[in-house]
Image (cartoon, rainbow, N blue to C red):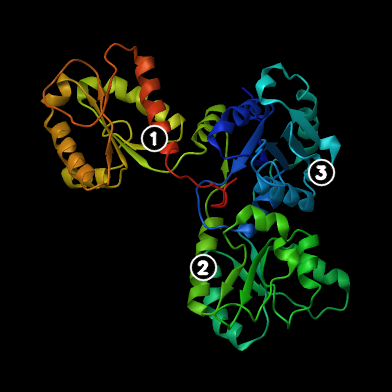
Amino acid sequence: MNTARRIPTYFSHSYRREDRDVNEFFWRTFDAHRFGFTVDPQSGPLSTCHLEMVMRRSACFVAVVTLRRQQHTYKCSPFIVYEYGLAVRARKPRLVFAEKGVPAHLFPDATERFVFDRDDLDTYDGFEGPVRRLLLQAQGYSAAGDQLIGEVGLALPDSPAYRRAMPLLTQALQRFGYAVSKVDLDFRDPGGIAFQLDRFDFVMIDVAARRLPKWLYPLLFGRFIPTLNLVHHEAADRSDRRVPEMVVGEVLRDATQPYDPVLWWRDPGQLATELERQLARFDLPRNQFRTMDEGIGYIRSTGRAHGRIFLSTAGPDNALSREVGRVLKLHNFDFFHYVYNNTIPKGSNWQLRLEEQLTASQVFVPLVSEAYWRSDWCRRELVTARKLSDEGRLTIIPYFLDGSSGETIPEQGTDIADLTEAERVGRIVGDMDTHFTDRPAQDPVSGAEA
């Protein structure tokens, strides 16, 4: 058994459903060489600082760039172009696999750029060499993500507004385990400031402050020190402050519309609240694929809205329920089942907790059979689900396992009585994927479309 650690790899890719097969092809290739792709675990507020921190703690960078003919200028996701720029700034070993038709100038280093045709992926045998070379470059940095919570540098002006906000900022940072230091700009040796900045996990800086040296942000940018970028403003329309072009830039602006990558603030309480939202994002565990199945499950979930499934079955049908639950887990669905995915604490009021689980779900899936109609619990679940459905809070999608007709179910369902177990499972999971994919979904990395 190979127990070697996986190499933490920043994986930049499309989140669209139609690109799943392409992403899966490349994941299988990299999985065989001990790479572990890292992605954000959930959607959340855009944080360029978080992306910079994840990049800094990755051993290398891999991008799979799929063609988007309707995308002006880029012909691909502008967010991938932005993340590639992060990798260049961080001086990470890189590989870019770009679909034919993507503009070459966006990924200018031809030695790290390889072209593919999605219709002929299975015929490619020239990717092994580049992947092996990346392995040689990155394998010495497999512990890049093993970091303790460290220190945050504050590069904020000595103004009345920041003096009022400072206790709240310090308190929030310390609550998440960070040590807090003021960036010391009183130095004699120019090398001293660089040595100081390199020790910080990230630096909070007001990028529009007139009282800070103009060279400070470019120095942070060039040394790839993650920055949490603030702007304090007095005017309601923010007209009294302007963000330097280096902080945002054209690619980031195109990639993140309509999200603002800079934290604007007037009220100290509001600033502290927004800071805590970002810190909570930093505090989430890195989501690195450790097995083939983890990676495939994630990839097959891209382009899908988040939502919970309540799987309702009677005891005699639990063998099918177990297999449905196993594949739902493999495909990264959030679901509840009273046996195979039961999150109700022992000793709780069962009926009350069951209703809470139903209320928290978006889809109710009853596997209907003679045994289902004989179960009092199943009937109760169906009554509660119908009430929620009538209120527009739940969708009922039934599957009929036999010819039983204990009660009429008005919702459109599917007769799967004549299918094999594998076909039944495939139909149910496929329908769930279609249902949640047809709902609006956001990019798990940033909330922006990628």
* Quadrant showing the N terminus: top right
Q: Earlier in the sequence, mark 3 or mark 1?
A: 3
Tell me residue 440's x, y (percent).
Answer: 45, 45
Q: CA distance from mark 2 to mark 1?
A: 33 Å
Nearest the eye: 276 or 262:
262
**Element type at mark 2:** helix
Point out the residue furthest to the right here: 189
Residue 24 visible within the image: yes
Residue 175 visible within the image: no
Q: Earlier in the sequence, mark 2 or mark 3?
A: 3
Q: Residue at x 87, y 78 (%)?
A: 188
Tell me residue 407's x, y (percent).
Answer: 11, 26
Q: Report the amino acid beneath label 2.
A: Glu
Q: Earlier in the sequence, mark 2 or mark 1?
A: 2
Q: Report the amino acid beneath label 1.
A: His
Q: Find disc 3 in the rendering and name its residue.
A: 105
How dense is the environment of label 3, judged by Cα within 10 Å: few (below 14), some, or many (20 and up)? few
Nearest the eye: 90 or 266:
266
The reply to whether callout 2 and callout 1 are in contact (CB within 8 Å) is no
Q: Nearer the viewer, mark 2 or mark 1?
A: 1
Nearest the eye: 354 or 192:
354
Q: Nearer the viewer, mark 2 or mark 3?
A: 3
Q: Find disc 2 in the rendering and name its residue.
A: 274
Quarter of the rendering containing residue 178: bottom right
Q: CA distance from mark 3 to mark 1?
A: 38 Å
Q: Report the amino acid beneath label 3.
A: His
Q: Which mark is residue 435?
A: 1
Q: Residue at x 39, y 35 (%)?
A: 435
Q: Residue at x 30, y 43 (%)?
A: 361
* Quadrant showing the C terminus: top right
Q: Is residue 394 left or right of residue 269?
A: left
Q: Is residue 300 above or below residue 107?
A: above
